[in-house]
Image (spheres, rainbow, N blue to C red):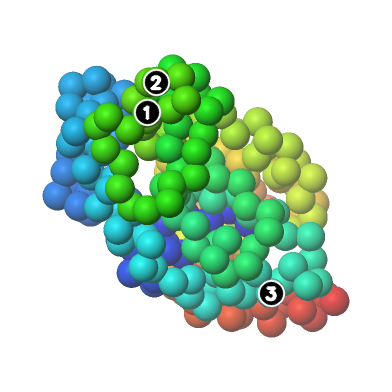
Amino acid sequence: MVLTGAGISAESGLKTFRDSDGLWEGHSIDDVATPMAWERNPGLVLEFYNQRRRQGIDAEPNAAHRILAELEQHFDVQIITQNVDNLHEKAGSTHVLHLHGELMKARSTKDPSLVYDLKSWSLNLGDTCELGSQLRPHIVWFYEDVPAIREAAEIASEADICLVVGTSLVVYPAAGLVDYVPRSAPVFVVDPNAPTVSRKNVVYVKEKATVGMEKMREVLMKSV
């Protein structure tokens, strides 16, 4: 199991979730990433995610993404990502569970099960689903449930090895997934500011994702 966060995508030019001043690309989270923001000003929310999509379309996977994809040749690699970009898929990973939604998808505001792939970066007021209701970003906003968390917990509970790459482990419920990993499984935490995991059998690799995953590839391949 691999749990990834914003740090792995930062080296592909995508900014981490929010800056130290609490803003995300100059916007308050409360203005662009909550159900209340959507009710208050859907046009602003749509434009915000349009800009994120424009950035994401041009972004390319980095060495850390590619190493995780290559490891599928030797391991059953199950990626659980907090990221909404598609860089893991671009790199070739085939088992990716997005906890917080996917930037290149939209969903119906009337029936959440109606999810559509977006062909371009643009999603606007007046773009509707087959039921005639407005489409919204397929993103899990603050104060919303995380539908995929149960599946993620099941994956974690069956892990033989756990990698945590580029995440501060402060956003829940994702941060709690490590607690589901069997106590017999080694946990490797790859991050320059590696968060402390309160369990035994943890190895900290205090490097950025690309450098840390190069080291992890060497460690893992020794077991093949």
Q: Nearer the viewer, residue 90 or 132?
A: 132
Q: Quadrant of the C terminus?
A: bottom right
Q: Is residue 74 above or below residue 139?
A: below
Label 1: which residue?
A: 128
Q: How many neighbours does mark 1 have within 10 angstroms: few (below 14), some (14-19), or many (20 or more)?
A: some
Say which element carries label 3.
Answer: helix
Could you say which is closer to the camera, residue 89 or residue 126? Answer: 126
Residue in the image at 64% along x and 63% along y: 93
Instruction: Give the residue at mark 3.
Output: 70
Location of the N terminus by quadrant is bottom right
Residue 179 point in image, percent of width and height = 64, 40
Question: Is 63 drawn above or below residue 69 in the view shown?
Answer: below
* Residue 87: numbered disc: none
Query: Does residue 103 appear left or right of residue 122 in this picture?
Result: right
x 63%, y 52%: residue: 96
- Camera sees residue 46: yes
Please tell me which residue is depicted at 27% across the width and 29% down the height of the picture.
126
Task: Judge whether residue 194 can be spotted in this image.
Answer: no
Mark 2–mark 1 CB contact (< 8 Å):
yes
Q: Amino acid at mark 3?
A: Glu
Three-letter amino acid code of the residue under disc 1: Thr
Residue at point 47%, 25% (across, down): 130
- Residues under labels 1 and 3: Cα distance? 39 Å
Residue at far right of view: 224
Which x, y percent locates residue 79? 63, 54
Q: Give the number of the disc on residue 132.
A: 2
Mark 3 crowd level (few <14, some 14–19, many ≥20, 10 Å Cα): some
> Quadrant location of residue 36?
top left
As helix, strand or loop, the secondary structure at mark 1 comes to: loop
